[in-house]
Amino acid sequence: MIGSGVSEAATTSPTGTSVTLLIADDDEVTRSGLRTLLAAQPGIAVIGEAADGVEAVEQARRLRPDVVLMDVRMPRRNGIEATRQLLAESAEPPKVVVITTFENDGYVTAALSAGASGFVLKRLPVRQIAEAVRVVAAGEAILFPAALRRMIAARPLGSAEALPKAALTGREEEVLRLMATGLSNPEIAQSLTVTLETVKTHVGHVLTKLGAQNRTHAVVIAYESGLVVPGFAG
């Protein structure tokens, strides 16, 4: 599921309990407000806060949250480096959702490339931020294609030849382009008239060949390489 509705299965963590959440933001008012509002959302338990990237990593180690809601612009260590460290040092790291004020923030694409599962804007209604937390905890990605295209459009594009040497097959490229439009696996299966298991296999091959941390990272690679252009609409 990518930037759309949330299923009942995504309202809790994989263990069937509330999704545990750590909020990292250097602005105390923002952090406190997010904690109060998200704690009131069903299926979410806010278990900690962090005021910078160093503290975010330390708190994540100690509390082991399901998801970290990570601001990208923080002192001592920014959200990009904190995300990279969290994902590198644990076999079962928390999912990271980047939260930002500006859609065209270059820090966001860098954080997605570092392995964050998606991003949300601070101005979104709290129920949408909560939805993003639940969906990511369920193992899916949060991707807003239009916003991502705008961010990538502001950056210089490379060539599709810059993709890893393990070239994608024609079908895998087709699946990747559909992923970039925001389609879920079931929607891709319907579009291509193939089974869901076939799509999952193609997505797995795409992630492996691109060396992508997750589906969102694969889409960023596709845009940055020029395989998918910012104006692509499916």
Image (spheres, rainbow, N blue to C red):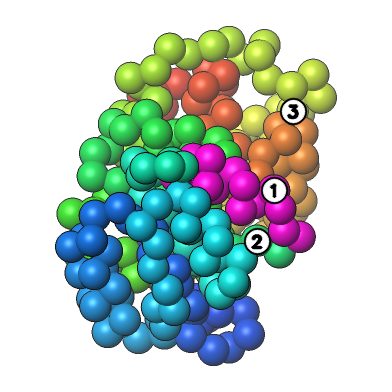
Extreme residue toward the front, this view: 76
Q: Residue at (46%, 42%) from the top-left corner?
A: 77
Q: Which residue is mark 3?
A: 168
**Residue 105 image point, x, y percent:** 31, 33
Between 71 and 181, the one nearer to me in the picture: 71
Task: Tell us which disc is closer to us: 3 or 2.
Answer: 2
Characterize the magenta stretch by its predominant secondary structure.
Answer: helix
**Element assignment for label 3:** loop
Q: Residue 23: in sight, yes or no?
A: yes
Residue at coordinates 79% horizontally, 19% vertically from top-left?
Answer: 165
Label pair 1/2, CB-CB below 8 angstroms:
yes
Distance in Å between CA atoms under marks 1 and 2: 8 Å
Hey, what amino acid is under mark 1? Answer: Ala
Labels 3, 1: front one: 1
- The Cα–Cα distance between marks 3 and 2, rounded to whole angstroms, is 28 Å
Decide if residue 70 is on the left or right side of residue 226.
Answer: left
Mark 3 crowdedness (10 Å alpha carbons): few <14, some 14-19, many ≥20: some
Secondary structure found at label 2: loop
Task: Name the image quarter holding residue 149.
Answer: top left
**Which range of residues does the magenta coloring cover?**
79-91
What residue do we see at 74% from left, 48% from top? 204
* Residue topped by disc 2: 93
Residue 4 in the image, given as x and y percentages of width and height: 37, 60
How crowded pointer 1 is (Cα within 10 Å; few <14, some 14-19, many 20+) is rated as few
Q: Is residue 49 left or right of residue 172?
A: left
Q: Is residue 163 above or below residue 90?
A: above
Q: Earlier in the sequence, mark 3 or mark 1?
A: 1
The residue lying furthest to the right in this view is 166
Question: Does 34 sit above or below residue 161?
Answer: below
Residue in view at x 62 percent, y 79 percent: 14
Quickly name the residue at label 1.
88
If you read the primary sequence from the N terminus, does the residue marked by circle 1 or circle 2 appear first? 1
